[in-house]
């Protein structure tokens, strides 16, 4: 994955094609990938396709409007029943900063206003520190190892994998417990993210049995769809190596923070499972 991909893409959202073209070109020259949207449906599609880290837009009385920005933020939080994405900061060129400032404060939106007369160049100048921070605060480099993801619905796992891959993380998705077990036996990932449906189904018995017997297994982040389970479950019922439990809908920011902490302490190269078993015999 290239440096620009790890730095994250920028959503340039405005109807004015020439201005959008100038801003996209400026971001690309600075090493960041830019994607253009002219309407709310295009912006929502970009969120699910490119997972941008920020928005550069105009507030000029048409698309995007302040209601459009509010809708996009709500979509990130409520658009998927299994995950909530952190809201993107927004930098907006506008000819009426005073009027918009009051509305933005009342709505609590992450929008930074830039007077229109300062021009598109000011957008890049003000977003520059944030882009640098996003690059430095990247989840990890691929050298830290692989994350294996097992969700009850593989399409949800694929969505999460694309989200974290857009942030520089090496993620692989297992379609079911037998595939997860086969992958673990071939190569131990740095972290296993596993939904708790595997504890309720016979198909998960072999997976958890292997994890319990192995001499060295990856740390496990368990995702539960039943928060009430946490209030009455016995500690002995929680498989070993489960280091944290998150509930659905998953907060991508919380999962990302857990992965960041684990991967920073992970070995540079995950050892093959066969080698681990040999070493402990």
Image (spheres, grey):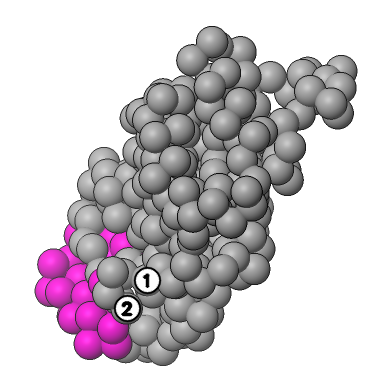
Q: Where is residue 15 in the image (x, y as percent from the top left)?
A: 20, 60
Does residue 210 sit above or below 1 in this rendering?
above
Residue 85 in view here: yes
Left or right: where does residue 193 sit relative to residue 43?
Answer: right
- Is residue 264 on the magenta stretch? no
Tag shown at residue 3: 2
- Determine the residue positioned at 41% across, 89% down: 125
Q: Badge 2: few (under 14), some or many (20 or more) residues near its Cα, within 10 Å? A: few
Q: Where is residue 236 in the image (x, y as percent from the top left)?
A: 84, 26
Left or right: where does residue 233 sit relative to residue 220?
Answer: right
Q: Of helix, strand and loop, which one carries label 1?
A: helix
Q: Of helix, strand and loop, which one carries label 2?
A: helix
Read off the magenta span.
10-33
Does residue 133 sit above or below 38 in this rendering?
below
**Mark 1 and 2 residues: CB-CB less than 8 Å, in contact?**
yes
- Is residue 14 on the magenta stretch? yes
Does residue 148 sit above or below 231 in this rendering?
below
Q: Position of residue 108 (x, y in %)?
A: 63, 54
Q: Badge 1: few (under 14), some or many (20 or more) residues near its Cα, within 10 Å? A: many
Does residue 117 sit above or below 46 in this rendering?
below
- Determine the residue positioned at 36% across, 84% down: 124
- Closer-to-camera residue (142/5): 142
Q: Where is residue 165 in the image (x, y as percent from the top left)?
A: 37, 57
Tag shown at residue 273: none
- Closer-to-camera residue (247/189): 189
- Determine the residue positioned at 18% across, 81% down: 25
Residue 253 in view here: no
- Closer-to-camera residue (170/135): 170
Tag shown at residue 6: 1
- Determine the residue positioned at 70% across, 40% down: 242
Indicate the quadrant containing the N terminus: top left, top right, bottom left or bottom right. Answer: bottom left
Left or right: where does residue 55 sit relative to residue 254?
Answer: left
């Amino acid at each position: 994955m290239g440096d620009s991909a790890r730095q994250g893409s920028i959503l340039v959202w405005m109807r004015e094609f020439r201005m959008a073209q100038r801003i996209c070109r400026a971001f690309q020259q600075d090493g960041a990938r830019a994607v253009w949207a002219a309407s709310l449906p295009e912006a929502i599609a970009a969120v699910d396709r490119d997972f941008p880290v920020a928005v550069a837009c105009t507030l000029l009385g048409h698309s995007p409007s302040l209601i459009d920005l509010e809708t996009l933020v709500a979509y990130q939080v409520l658009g998927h029943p299994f995950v909530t994405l952190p809201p993107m900061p927004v930098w907006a060129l506008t000819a009426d900063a005073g009027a918009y400032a009051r509305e933005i404060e009342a709505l609590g939106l992450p929008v930074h206003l830039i007077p229109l007369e300062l021009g598109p160049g000011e957008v890049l100048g003000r977003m520059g520190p944030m882009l640098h921070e996003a690059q430095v605060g990247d989840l990890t480099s691929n050298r830290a190892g692989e994350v294996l993801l097992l969700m009850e619905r593989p399409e949800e796992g694929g969505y999460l994998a694309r989200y974290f891959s857009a942030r520089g993380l090496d993620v692989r998705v297992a379609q079911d417990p037998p595939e997860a077990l086969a992958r673990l036996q071939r190569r131990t990932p740095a972290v296993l993210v596993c939904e708790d449906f595997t504890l309720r189904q016979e198909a998960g018995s072999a997976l958890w049995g292997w994890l319990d017997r192995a001499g060295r297994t990856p740390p496990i982040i368990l995702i539960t769809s039943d928060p009430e389970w946490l209030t009455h479950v016995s500690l002995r019922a929680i498989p070993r190596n489960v280091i944290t439990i998150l509930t659905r809908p998953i907060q991508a920011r919380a999962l990302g923070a857990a992965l960041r902490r684990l991967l920073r302490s992970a070995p540079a190269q995950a050892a093959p499972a066969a080698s681990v078993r040999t070493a402990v015999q």
